[in-house]
Amino acid sequence: MLSRAFGHARFVYNQYISWRQWEYEHAMSSKDTRRSFSYMRSVLTSKNKTAFPWLSEVSSIILQEATDQADKAYWQMIANRAKGQPSKLPFRSKRG
């Protein structure tokens, strides 16, 4: 059960990072066009369960925490890039 929870959280985390990166690459960085954190969180944790029904297997709190962590990691990466520091996208991978 714990492994499943970690896997689902990793999936939602990486989905969030991918979505933010897509916005960034398509010049949607103005506040008028950028999706809010709360909107993206609701899509990834509740509305996404329609596309990925297996996300219902774990508590939505786990998925919400994953989006919180992804948001912090993404914006930290952007801040590091603004300072001229090389930064890679903060994707999470499964470690065996």
Image: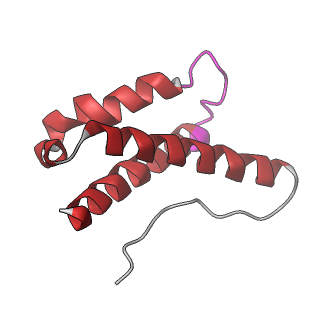
Instruction: Let me know if residue 78 appears in the view.
Output: yes
- 89 in relation to 67, above or below: below
Q: Position of residue 4 (x, y in %)?
A: 21, 62
At horizontal 27% and vertical 55% (from top left) the residue drawn is: 8
For residue 48, what is the image quadrant? top left
For the rendered model, the colour scheme is secondary structure
Prevailing secondary structure class for the magenta stretch in the rendered image? loop
- Answer with left or right where residue 22 lies relative to residue 58: right
Give the residue displayed 16% in from the left and 39% down from the top.
51
Find residue 42 and report its horizontal and vertical position in percent: 35, 27
Left or right: 39 as drawn, with respect to 77:
left
Q: Can you give x and y, in whole percent of width and height, for residue 85 in the image?
A: 83, 61
Instruction: Tell me the residue at 39%/79% (across/down).
Output: 95
Q: Quadrant of residue 49?
A: top left
Q: Residue at x 14, y 48 (%)?
A: 57
Q: Can residue 26 be found in the magenta stretch?
A: yes
Q: Which residue in the rendered view is the most extreme toward the top?
A: 32
Relative horizontal placement of residue 69, taking residue 49 as reference (left or right): right
Quadrant of the image occupied by residue 93: bottom left
Quadrant including the C terminus:
bottom left
Identify the magenta region.
24-34
The answer to whether 2 is drawn above or below residue 52 in the figure is: below
Name the outermost residue toward the front.
2
Q: Is residue 19 visible?
A: no
- Specify the quadrant that holds the N terminus: bottom left
> What is the count of numbered marks?
0
Q: Is residue 4 magenta?
A: no
Q: Position of residue 94 (x, y in %)?
A: 36, 73
